[in-house]
Image (spheres, rainbow, N blue to C red):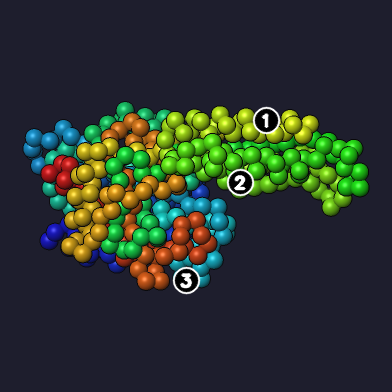
Amino acid sequence: MTLRDRLDALHPEMTAWRRDFHAHPELGFEETRTSAIVASMLESWGIEVHRGLGKTGLVGVLRGKRDAAGANRAIGLRADMDALPMQEANSFAHSSQNPGRMHACGHDGHTTMLLGAAKVLAETRDFSGTVYLIFQPAEEGLAGAKAMLDDGLFERFPCDAIYGIHNEPLLPLGTAKVLTGTALAAIDYFQVTLRGRAAHGAQPHNGIDTVSVAAQVINALQAIPSRHVDALESAIISIGQIHGGTSDIIIPETIELRGSVRTLKPEVRDRVEELFHRAVRLTAEAQGATAEIVYRRAYPPTINTPAETDRAAIVAAEALGPNGTILRDAPPILAGEDFAFMLEKCPGAYILMGQSQGGIGAVPVHNSGYDFNDALLPIGASYLAGMVKQELG
């Protein structure tokens, strides 16, 4: 049987795993149940397990039996395990049993696909070299990849290349997006506290109106991408939160703005950060207010290396079959991904696989109605297992 045949046969079992993970979501660095289940399954298949990297992360070590020229070569396959702090709106049998937590990005599916690949690879170990099965915590804004790296991931498990995968509801099932170079954006977060002087709503002249200042700051920030960054480049500044005030008749002393910045190129990232500080500070000062700025660089851009991406495209095409579609020249997306930290240290590729199938799997990620399309499980697992065949023969 081929790898795909074995994974198709495993599909019902994988679906059960995935739905169990979906029903029991855990937030970043809290994935104790998920991590324990993953470790137990790997060990039951004879795979060596190392726990505690990045707190709840773990690595399975799978060594091939074939003695060939590449016997000293090693690759990493990575899946993320964490859920989001969201209330699920779905009512199917496997919907979240943990209030305020939901697998709304498909990490339950990613974990399951890597487990499926691990199981079929462990059955024969028909490759040379070593596969490191990296189950990562806390991708959703908490930089679990960096935490694993800080705990010595690549020192303890040195990889010649590393590969990751993400589902994509905006692409149809049977399509993969495999981009050389920048595939996803850098993402940064900010918190701006504007301080003025409180006043009664009937006497605004006695105060410094932070609400008015906030409106002007927002307009100044929106002008940065449209008027200070080349229109052929990509930059997005999004305000996600505005907080301030306790009364309908009192102008508040402080207003807080929170949001994110997304860029694709390091030089544009640097320029936007510089302009951000200047726009906020000078706009506030012009109205007599002050501004405290916390600007946090979160994830770097996800940059795929050329040779590894070319090989990933070959394997993705095999996993999708003769009717599949590989997108090589599509534009990158402005979402962020902490797999970028791993790609800064090691060559590799991160690809997107479509999961939309009629009305199934078409709800966007980070939506309370999202669910992973289980039809993608054997395809994604075939890709991950196929990378081992491609890289380690």
**What is the quadrant of the N terminus in the image?**
bottom left
Q: CA distance from mark 2 to mark 3?
A: 33 Å
Q: Amino acid at mark 3?
A: Phe
Q: CA distance from mark 1 to mark 2?
A: 17 Å
Can residue 15 be seen here? no
Give the residue number, with chain letter if any, for mark 1: 281
Can residue 369 be seen here? yes
Q: Earlier in the sequence, mark 2 or mark 3?
A: 3
**What is the quadrant of the C terminus in the image?**
top left
Image side of residue 23 versus residue 68, left or right: right
Q: Report x, y in % for residue 267.
A: 44, 30
Q: Is residue 118 above or below residue 66?
A: below
Q: Nearer the viewer, mark 1 or mark 2?
A: 1
Q: Quadrant of residue 159?
A: top left
Q: Nearer the viewer, residue 384 or 282?
A: 282
Report helix, strand or loop for mark 1: helix
Q: Nearer the viewer, residue 28 or 60?
A: 28
Q: Report x, y in % for residue 70.
A: 12, 35
Q: Report x, y in % for residue 354.
A: 34, 59
Identify the residue shown where x is 27% and y is 31%.
158
Give the residue number, with chain letter if any, for mark 2: 239
Tell whether label 3 touches label 2 (CB within 8 Å).
no
Q: Report x, y in % for residue 4.
A: 19, 60
Q: Earlier in the sequence, mark 1 or mark 3?
A: 3
Q: Is residue 27 above or below residue 277?
A: below
In the drawing, what numbered circle is on residue 92?
3
Report helix, strand or loop for mark 3: loop
Q: Amino acid at mark 2?
A: Ile
Q: Nearer the viewer, mark 2 or mark 3?
A: 2
Q: Nearer the viewer, residue 74 or 268?
A: 268
